[in-house]
Amino acid sequence: MALNRKLAYIDLGQKKTIVKEIPYEWRRKFLGGRGISAYLLFRHLPKGSDPLGPGNVVIISTGVLGGTGFGPFECTGITSKSPLTGLSAFSPVTGHFAGEMRWAGFDHLVITGKSRHPVYLYIHDGKIDFKTAKNLKGKSISETLGNIRKDLLDEDVRALVVGPAGENRVCFADVSTDCGHRAGRTGMGAVLGSKNIKAVVCRGARDVLVKRPVDLLAYQKEIFDRLLPIIHLPHAPSTFEKNEVSIRDMTVNSFQRADRDSEMALRHLIAESGSDLFSTRCILEWVLRLFQAGIITQKKIRDIPLSRNNIATHMEVVNRITANKGIGTTLSLGPLGASKKLGKESLSCFPSVIELIQMYTEAVADPLAPAQRDISFLKVNNNAHEKSYPIKTTGMRVTDRCESGSIDRRTMGKMPGRKVSEMVANCLGFNGFHVPEDILGMPLFSVYEKLLDLVTGLRVKKNDLAEIAHRCYATERLLNLRESSIHGRPASITEAFDVPVGLRMTKSCWDGLELKTFQRLVSRYYKGKGWDRKSMVKLRFFKNLGIEDLWVLLK
Amino acid sequence: MGFVEVKSRSSISDRQLVVDPKKCTGCRQCEIVCSISQCGVSNPTKSRIRIIHWRNKGIFIPISCQQCEDAPCMTACPREAIQRDTGLNRVVVDYDRCISCKICVSACPFGAMGFDPQDQKIFKCNLCDGDPQCVRFCYPQSIDFTDPGRLQYPRIRNAALKYAGFGRKTHVVFSGK
Ligand code: SF4
Ligand code: SF4
């Protein structure tokens, strides 16, 4: 059966693995991918564990449609407690890793503990080997890949690789695939690095069963043909690169560098060191502004003559961040962490609050993320909102109402239609499948229903899918409520407001939006949608969702 | 699938599978689609078309059965289980005669003959009985299913363009120099 798939518990400390079948009941409740990962994280993450300590748990997952020919949309998800926010995070990465992991025999890898020496995991045909990575220490992404390929005498391995930034626990370190796709935000590179994992490598020759192959191919062809006008299919690596460049250009446009070659060299350096490009560029701009404001002095950064036009200085700062040395020790904590050392007023120099939000909240599972974003755009006009989200339509017209099958909708929180569809996509193993209805020729949810049926034989109705999405969000949110009560307030964007009057960011949509107003908006958002602590932390709520086994873990 | 049965289903067609490695992006969609259509499972190792790559150099080459006129696998087969299907101009395996000795796998210079350890059967590209799925799903159009008369046409056209000097400053042919 297509859903008879395995998950592996990998204990790095003991170097032991346990392989288990994924229970059918989990599929019914969480489907796969992000949903099952959220559930597993709740079950295995010890309360209050340090994101960069051995107690943290990393879950690498693929969805139920992984490896069945949806190339550009398929994603692998990395779920863990983020060192940036202290909350649970899901970081999706496109590329071919998802399929290879399924062909290697696994849908989920639950990684716990910490290895004594650097290792990379080699997953092949149902087996998991711990391979030494002592010789890979400090190596860049491409060097690491080259060495692993030589070591395994296999050019076709697929890998998730951590760069030196991740090894040195830079809080915004990312994870790169062998073809350069990145799990950017939320610092998953640092979490893997803190466990002494240099890479997770897959190679498989096992079957991924498909329930109705002929119908699947016919339907896939229909979908791809419909998508042709709006997307490049299949995803050529060069196309991906181009996309990334445009995003980067869009985000930090104040660098105003003339020299294209050195600009490329800087990007290359950041990518090879395994830092999130967006975050690192924001930090670089921040450093310049801190320097101009006299918050970082010449003495503090030693002999680097910091200048906007001298790319070498940027490279030196990147190198220090990567090595977590000198000024890099502070900067590698991320802006909110660093501001604790540099002083609250330092945050007023950050390029913009929007960038601060994006650095912290992109792909973070807490519904606060969209809340912060939505609220952040209250102050700007609709056009600017559109610009920031180049998604043509929501694709799904479920509206704000919670549509549910067996769960009692009166006691459930509400989610915007787009969030529901995003969550279902992540559970299926898709990312970025925001396709307008008129192009698909049918509602997005009907496409999901049909694909699920063709690939797995599961007949799940739209309402059930919405219910699954709610259950998954609730699981993530409950975990976040649990974790934030331990550390007090987790690293939160609200700190951005905690700066002396007069030093607050200028030229941002947050001007005049006081901290209290913001907090009020956030709490109203949660209360109004039923995602606040009072509505959620009740045994009845857990029972309604069918996750009462997690109740004891909440306490 | 028996040889006789295949032959009777075939329509007369001369078309052949041709690849243009320059257009291949290495997406491996063809491999997945081939395995799904041929075996009903997703597993690139069971695909009849394979992408060989030098990823760092950006080189991707799709390799599948060339349906050779004088096929080494056909010659090597001790049971004469591999024969030519003239209807679709392809080389086919008669599984009623095949004893899975795998000598064809060794004989094929392209490595286009595969062996499925689960089924204990050899496999090769059968041109999807005239509707190649890999071609349908190769959006960069690196694989094509075309008439022999047009096989070399794109290359001839490219060569002619170069010869004529398009893209150069002087048009060699037309300037008479
Ligand atoms: S589908 Fe086409 S472009 Fe993609 S790997 Fe196959 S031959 Fe190359
Ligand atoms: S023509 Fe059919 S059998 Fe041959 S490689 Fe393409 S998809 Fe596979």
Image (cartoon, rainbow, N blue to C red):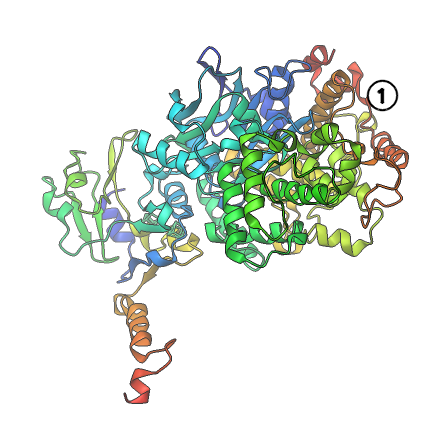
The chain letter for the residue carrying disc 1 is A
- B22 is higher (above) or lower (below) than A425: below
Which residue type does callout 1 highlight? Answer: Lys
Quarter of the image with the C terminus of chain A in it? top right
- B174 is higher (above) or lower (below) than A395: below
Q: What residue do we see at 82% from left, 54% from top?
A: A381
Task: Say whether residue A148 is left or right of residue A447.
Answer: left
Give the SS element for disc 1. helix
Residue A447 shows in the view: yes
Q: What residue do we see at 47% from left, 33% from top?
A: A161
In this figure, which residue is indicated by the disc labeled 1?
A: A534
- A47 is higher (above) or lower (below) than A463: above
Comparing B37 with A6, the one in front is A6
Task: Say whether residue A339 is left or right of residue A107.
Answer: right
Q: Residue furthest bottom?
A: B176
- A271 is higher (above) or lower (below) than B148: above
| Residue B43 position within the rendered picture, expressed as x and y whole percent measured from the top left | 38, 36
| Residue A98 position within the rendered picture, expressed as x and y whole percent measured from the top left | 48, 35
Q: How many marks?
A: 1
| Residue A237 position within the rendered picture, expressed as x and y whole percent measured from the top left | 46, 49
Dividing the picture into quadrants, the one containing residue A51 is: top right
Q: What residue do we see at 75% from left, 43% from top?
A: A293
- Dot 1 alpha-carbon crowd within 10 angstroms: few under 14, some 14 to 19, many 20 or more: few
| Residue A21 position within the rendered picture, expressed as x and y whole percent measured from the top left | 49, 19
Task: Say whether residue A212 is left or right of residue A188.
Answer: left
Comparing A245 with A240, the one in front is A245
Task: Say whether residue A530 is left or right of residue A318.
Answer: right
Residue A222 shows in the view: no
Q: What residue do we see at 50% from left, 55% from top?
A: A261
